[in-house]
Amino acid sequence: MRAGLLALAAATFGAPAFAQQSIIDSIDMQAVCDAADAHMDYFREHLASPAPNETEFMLQVIVPVSGKPGTKEYVWVTSLAPFATEGQGILDNDAERLPLKKGDTLKFRRDMVCDWGFRRDGMMIGHYTTRAALTVLSPDVAMVVGAKLGRNPE
């Protein structure tokens, strides 16, 4: 639903839902992680004390793929509690390169977090991966997805 916006947009326009990792592979994820990390305190403040119009808090976690050096999977987790160095959440999407399914519990370290997001008045705040993906999506899909993005902290 939330995390699978790229997959949903791809499926809506005829591309397979499993296209999410291939989209991620085509953008500069280090830049995405750096941009999201620069505003992690903002996310944590809102997670700890959300306004009534703020919902659907999630983190994107990088998980190394066992047996495939240098290969990683980016997955979204929800049902978060405020965290410092470690956390856990519920997988919000099926993994493509790992034996993880939506609904599984995933434990992670802070250094595994790449992106964050939540909704404010229905608009997506954070979601730096989605914003970066606008450059590689078709114009029609980018327009649909871009219309769901709210203003990020500066």
Image (cartoon, helix red, strand yellow):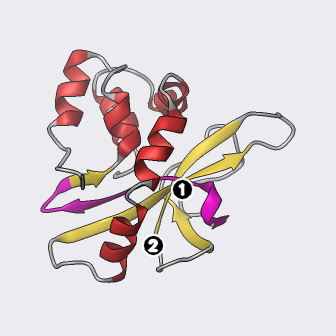
Q: Position of residue 2 (x, y in %)?
A: 34, 52
Q: Is residue 8 visible?
A: no
Amino acid on which disc 2 is placed:
Ser
Check disc 1 and report its element: helix, strand or loop: loop
Residue behind mark 2:
79
On screen, residue 92 versus residue 121, left or right, reads right
Q: Residue 124: which numbered mark, if any?
A: none
Residue behind mark 1:
102
Q: Is residue 3 magenta?
A: no
Tell me what residue is drawn at x 59 percent, y 73 percent: 87
Q: Is residue 48 above or below residue 31?
A: below
Q: Position of residue 143 (x, y in %)?
A: 17, 27
Mark 1, other Cα within 10 Å: few <14 / some 14–19 / many ≥20? some
Q: Is residue 109 magenta?
A: yes
On screen, residue 117 versus residue 151, left or right, reads right
SS majority, magenta: strand
Closer to the camera in the image, 56 or 12: 56
